[in-house]
Image (cartoon, rainbow, N blue to C red):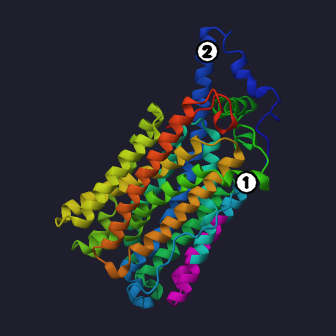
Amino acid sequence: MSSPKNGPIEEDALDRPDDSASTVPLSKTVEEKSFVVNTIRRVDLCILPLLGALYAVCVVDRGNLGLARVAGMDHDLKLSAGSRQLPSNLLLRKFGVSHWLAFCVISWGGVQLAMGFIPSWEYLALCRMLLGALEAGFFPGLVFIITTWYTRHEVQQRLAAFYIFSVVIGGFSAIFAYLLTLLSGKRGIAGWRWIFIVEGALTIALGLLAWCFIPDFPDQNRFLTQEETAMVLARVEKDRGDSVPDSFTVTKVVRHLSDWKIWIFGLMYFCTTVPAYAISFFVTNILLGMGWSMTAALLLSAPPYLFAAISIMIFAWLSDRYQQRALTIAIQVCATVVGCVLIGFCPVPAWKYVGIFLSNAGSGGCIPGILAYSSNNVVSYTKRGVTTAVVVSFGGIGGIFATTVFRQSDAPHYMPGIYATIGCQFVLLASLAITTVYFKTQNREVQKAPAEGKPRFVYTL
C-alpha cells in the first residue's frame, strides 16, 4: 500500500494536535476545528458510500433466493416445502484489505450469475455454499476498517450510514427483481433466472470498479495528506489509545478469545440478526400469506426498508450524541418484539404490515448499534479484529438459524419462527443487562484497575 500523500508520517506527528492546544489563540482553535470537521467529512465521503454500496450488493445478492422462489424457481427446480434450508452465510470469517475485498465481490458476482443457469436444486445448494464462503470475509472486514477511522462516539452514525445503503437498496431490490421477471421468455430464459443473471453481472462490474478505490486503514490511506492523516490518528490515539496497529500473534488471539465479553457481544448480534435475516428472506412470502398478489407483495416489500433507514439513523445519532449504546439498543429490541407480535398474532393484515415496519426497523437499528457497542469496548487492532470476526460470525449463525425456524412448511404464518425470534429478543435484553451492570461496576473502579489495560479508559454503556 502507498503511504499518505506528501511522504511518510513523522514519528512525533501523532502528538502535535494536543501539544499546542493550550497555547494557540482562539482564531487558531477555530481554524483547527474547521480542519478537523472538513477532514472527517472527506473521510466520510471517501469511505462510507463505496463500502455501503458494496455491502448493499452483498445483501441484495443474498436475498435473491427468496425473491426467485416467489418468481417461480420452486416450480422449475421442483423444490418442495422444507426439502432443504440453505444458509445465506457460512461461519468462515476472514479479514482483508482492498484487493481481498474486491476479489470477494467479483467472485460472488460470478457465482450469482451462474445461479441463473442452474438445472437443479443440487447445483443451487452448491452455489449458495460458495456464495456464503465468498461473502464470509467481506462484512467483518468492512466493519473493521470503518471502526479504525473514527472515535468511539462517532462510529455508530458511520456504521449506520454505511448499513443504510444496504437497507434502502435492499428494500428496492424486490421492485427491481419484479422488473427483471418481466424479461421472462426473453432468449428462452425464465424470469427468476434473469434476477440472478442481471444482478450477478452488476455485482461483477461494481467489484471491478471498486478494486482501485476501496479505502485502507488510516495509517496506509492514499487520499489524505500527511497532516490530515496525522490528525485522524491523533484523535483515535487520544480517544482509545490504539491508532498504531499492534502485531497479530497466536498468544494474543487466544487471550482475546478468552474474554467473555466478546462472546456475549456475539450472542447479542446473533439475536438481532435472526429477525433481520428472516424479514430479508421471507417478507414477500409473509405478504403473500396476507392475501396480496405476487406483484403487490414485491412492491409492498420496499416501504418498511425506507422507514427502517430513517429509524436507524435517528437512533444512531441519539446513541452517539448521548453516548448511550445499551439504552438505544434496548428500545429498538422492544420495537422488534412488538412488531413480531403483530405479525404473528394480529388477524388484521394492515396491522401485520405495521409489524413488518417495526420489526424491520428495530432489528435493523440494533445491527450497527451492537457493532458500535462491541467496538467501543475493546482496545487494540488485534482485539478489535478478533471481536469483529467473532461477532459477525454469530450473525452468520443467525442467518442459518433464521432459515431453520422460518420453514417453508410453516408458511404463510411462520409461527415457530415468530416464537423463536421473540425469544431471541429477550435473550438480547438479558445480555444487555449483564454487560451494563458489569461496565458500570468496572467504570467505578477504573482508578484501581485500568479497564482493557489502558489508563483512564472507561467502558461505553
Would you name the residue on which mark 2 appears? 29
Disc 2/disc 1 C-alpha distance (Å): 41 Å
Do we see residue 411 in this rendering?
A: yes
Q: Which amino acid does label 1 sit on?
A: Val
Q: What stretch is highlighted in magenta?
A: 104-128
Would you name the residue on which mark 1 appears? 253
In the rendered picture of this protein, how many numbered marks are placed on residues? Answer: 2
Q: Which structural element holds mark 2?
A: helix
Residue 114: where, in percent of width, then height? 57, 80
Q: Which structural element holds mark 1?
A: helix
Is 78 situated left or right of 148 in this image?
left
Please report the residue visible at 60 percent of the width from the left and 11 percent of the height from the top. Answer: 27
Q: Which amino acid does label 2 sit on?
A: Thr
Residue 229: where, in percent of width, then height? 71, 34
Q: Does the magenta stretch include residue 115?
A: yes
Is 209 situated left or right of 434 in this image?
right
Residue 444 sits in which quadrant? top right
- Along the viewing direction, whichever of 3 and 81 lies nearer the viewer: 81
Between circles 2 and 1, the one closer to the viewer is 1
Residue 345: where, in percent of width, then height? 22, 65
Q: Residue 445 carries which label?
A: none
Q: Classify 450 as above or below 360.
A: above
Q: Which secondary structure is most common in the magenta stretch? A: helix
Q: Does the magenta stretch include residue 399?
A: no
Residue 196: where, in percent of width, then height? 50, 75
